[in-house]
Image (cartoon, helix red, strand yellow):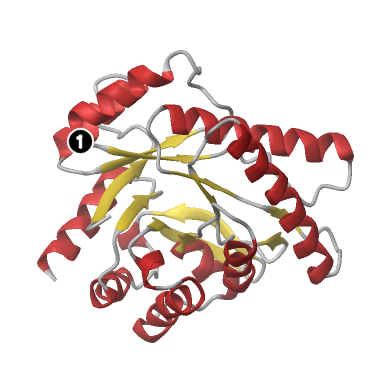
């Protein structure tokens, strides 16, 4: 991509309808550029209807991404849970791809008290299996393990960067709220710059032109994320976050997961364009 697109995690609150096509049209009407298909409970678009969504998105000029179901744990101990997790991720990726989606974000899993290096090797192995299946069905979507918000979850920045280097067709989803909540830091210009410097150092400059960002205010405890907040009601230093994006000249998509999804997407888009 050549620029940073701003969008909503799901159908905007202002949409006249509750279907995906209405959401895409509402995004365009609001002056935003992207929408994330929220498959967080289930994949709610059929393979048969996906081309219709793709046509609407192309007509409106709205980029699509996807968030896979929450019920994914690539470190699950029980074989049935592990296989179900992989199937959910493959299905979300496939349907998003048929909709014209560029990337599928997902929470990789939990440590479950297992030594972190062993967890990494398990997640890597299972993610390779997922990507192999996607390649087998001709699905070229970017698979995006997300930086996670709880210390019990696999997915700090180093782990995500390592996966991107070790597995084909994998790029990061950088969730700023999660990174802030997980360690109660990552909230200064210096730290924001360090995040993007790490992406560039580990994955190259091209990765900065192919970003998938999620943002929101966040409420947290010493264990990490509790819930999302409206940006202005949170302690997230979002103005410096946006300034960091400008400094590094990133491109891709920035998705608002705020309770006021379009309000905060528009807030940051205006900040970014006027900085």
Pick out the residue farthest to the left.
Answer: 274
Residue 79 found in image quarter? top right
Q: Residue at x 79, y 52 (%)?
A: 75
Identify whether 253 is placed above or below 151: above
Q: Residue at x 46, y 39 (%)?
A: 66
Identify whether 18 is placed above or below 39: above
Residue 204 found in image quarter? bottom left
Residue 213 location (% of width, % of height): 40, 57
User: Is 33 or 259 nearer to us in this picture?
Assistant: 33
Query: In the image, 93: left or right of 130?
Result: left
Residue 174 location (% of width, % of height): 47, 62
Identify whether 202 is placed above or below 20: below
Query: In the image, 256: left or right of 181?
Result: left
Is residue 15 visible from the viewing direction of this image? Answer: no
User: Is 55 or 135 nearer to us in this picture?
Assistant: 135
Pointer 1 residue: 61
Residue 221 location (% of width, % of height): 61, 67
Q: Residue at x 78, y 62 (%)?
A: 121
Q: Residue at x 64, y 64 (%)?
A: 166
Identify whether 143 is placed above or below 185: above
Is residue 269 visible from the viewing direction of this image? Answer: yes
Query: In the image, 249: left or right of 144?
Result: left
Quadrant for the C terminus, please: bottom left
């Amino acid at each position: 991509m050549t620029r940073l697109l701003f969008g909503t995690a799901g159908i905007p609150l202002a949409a006249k309808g509750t279907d995906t096509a209405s959401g895409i049209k509402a995004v365009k009407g609001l002056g935003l550029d992207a929408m994330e298909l929220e498959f967080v409970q289930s994949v709610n678009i059929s393979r048969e209807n996906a081309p219709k969504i793709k046509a609407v998105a192309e007509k409106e000029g709205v980029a699509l991404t996807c968030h896979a179901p929450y019920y994914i744990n690539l470190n699950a101990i029980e074989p049935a849970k592990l296989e179900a997790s992989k199937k959910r991720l493959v299905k979300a990726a496939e349907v998003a791809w048929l909709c014209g989606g560029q990337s599928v974000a997902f929470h990789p899993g939990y440590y479950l008290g297992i030594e972190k290096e062993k967890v990494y090797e398990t997640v890597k192995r299972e993610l390779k299996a997922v990507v192999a299946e996607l390649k087998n069905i001709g699905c070229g979507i970017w698979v995006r393990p997300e930086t996670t918000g709880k210390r019990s979850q696999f997915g700090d920045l180093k782990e995500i960067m390592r996966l991107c280097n070790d597995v084909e067709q994998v790029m990061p989803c950088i969730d700023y709220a999660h990174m802030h909540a997980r360690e109660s830091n990552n909230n200064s210009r210096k730290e924001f710059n360090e995040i993007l410097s790490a992406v560039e150092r580990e994955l190259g400059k091209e990765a900065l032109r192919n970003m998938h960002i999620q943002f929101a205010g966040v409420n947290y405890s010493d264990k990490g994320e509790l819930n999302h907040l409206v940006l202005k009601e949170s302690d997230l230093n979002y103005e410096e976050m946006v300034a960091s994006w400008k400094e590094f000249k990133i491109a891709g998509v920035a998705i608002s997961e705020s309770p006021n999804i379009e309000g905060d997407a528009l807030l940051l888009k205006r900040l970014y364009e006027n900085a």
